[in-house]
Amino acid sequence: MYSTCLFCHAPLGRNTTLEYSPHGRRFAFDRTRGRLWVICRTCHRWNLTPFEDRWEIIDECERRFRATQVRLSTDNIGLARLGDGTDLVRVGQPLRPEFAAWRYGRAFLSRRPLRAIHTLGGAGLLAAPVFLGALFGPVAPLALAGAAAVGAWRLTRRVAVSIDLSGAAELRLSTSQIQGAELIPDGASPDGWALLLDHLEDPNPLRRIGLSQRFAAERAVLTGLEARAAVTFVLPRLNPAGGSPGEVAEAVRWLEAVRGSDRAFATIARSHHVRPTLDSHKATLASMHTEVRLALEMAVHEEEEQRLLRGELSILERAWQREERLAAIADRLTVPEGVERQLADLRLAARRD
């Protein structure tokens, strides 16, 4: 195996996962044709490995790829990342993509301390008037209530999230407006759903004119990429305390029930079972079960990652097609005819399997 790139001579790196190939951090393999490349992360060229070094590594890459829980695939190529960061590019007939919940579980569990802070803070606010009344008389609790009212009013006017829209427009949302965000079905949108939001007035007159041309008064209806961008900011605000392991597992079951992240928003927007019975008449995201909001947050991240990976996969697929032509020529020059016949028999057997 090579330790440096054949084209730019940069180090190919080392991995701790593949027993038969410690050199390399990104491998591409085609089990049917018996091809193995080490992809240089510096110049992105594909280094075809020597013929005699391929088979054990290809088998190991296949086993590792099948055992990996997070992967993405198209019709011709699949991409997986191993535990040490090594990438495997599987050429041929990739497996069905799977996204496991453990990735999101860590992120949601890291927010759990915030829930305790919110609980303690709320208890402190409830107890504060009692202590102040005992120390300073009835005036102190009234003053505290007045200060709290002023603070609450300011929160309704303070910008909590700014969302960039097309046409140099910007949507500014307060905390209370985030709480009132509604997920609604939209038959006119290709995605089948839309986001309905109240928004603050923009201080910039040019942007304010642009928003007034698009939306009536303070109500905005977002669809497509703009709606996805908005929920990327809104959902973490509605899930500030993350979720327990049980809630994360239930969120994964919700994603399975709606048959994947790409259908999650449209299906949940039409469902009447995503809220408690007493809140079934509401359409806000905040009124949904915690597990449903977590499932939507998972879905929006998966959709975003898939779009990014599809761009990378299309580049990898074009590179594979180019390198496959070169590899076929190189193999015919170095392999005796008898070995080539044996390889043809092995490929036929692999296709039958």
Image: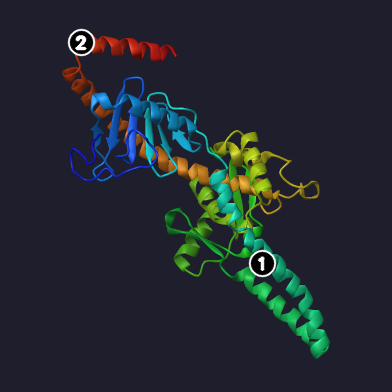
Q: Position of residue 155 (x, y in %)?
A: 63, 70
Look at the picture and state if 277 lies above or below 187: below
Instruction: Estimate the spatial distance between the alpha carbons at disc 1 and disc 2, rounded to whole Å.
Output: 73 Å
Question: Relative to residue 286, is residue 38 drawn left or right?
Answer: left
Residue 234 position by quadrant: bottom right
- Disc 1: which residue: 117
Q: Secondary structure at mark 1?
A: helix
- Which residue type carries mark 2? Glu
- Disc 2: which residue: 337
Look at the picture and state if 41 lies above or below 52: below
Question: Relative to residue 142, is residue 221 drawn left or right?
Answer: left
User: Mark 1 or mark 2: which comes first in sequence?
Assistant: 1
Q: Position of residue 290 (x, y in %)?
A: 68, 50
Q: Position of residue 37 (x, y in %)?
A: 28, 32
Residue for point 29% across, 10% down: 342
Question: Relative to residue 66, is residue 158 drawn left or right?
Answer: right
Residue 168 position by quadrant: bottom left
Q: In the image shown, does 39 or 155 lie closer to the viewer? A: 39
Question: Where does the C terminus fall, quadrant-wise?
Answer: top left
Residue for point 18% across, 43% down: 8
- Which residue type carries mark 1? Ile
Considering every residue shown, the one lying at the far front of the view is: 19
Q: Position of residue 129 (x, y in %)?
A: 79, 80
Tally of marks: 2
Question: Where does the N terminus fall, quadrant-wise?
Answer: top left
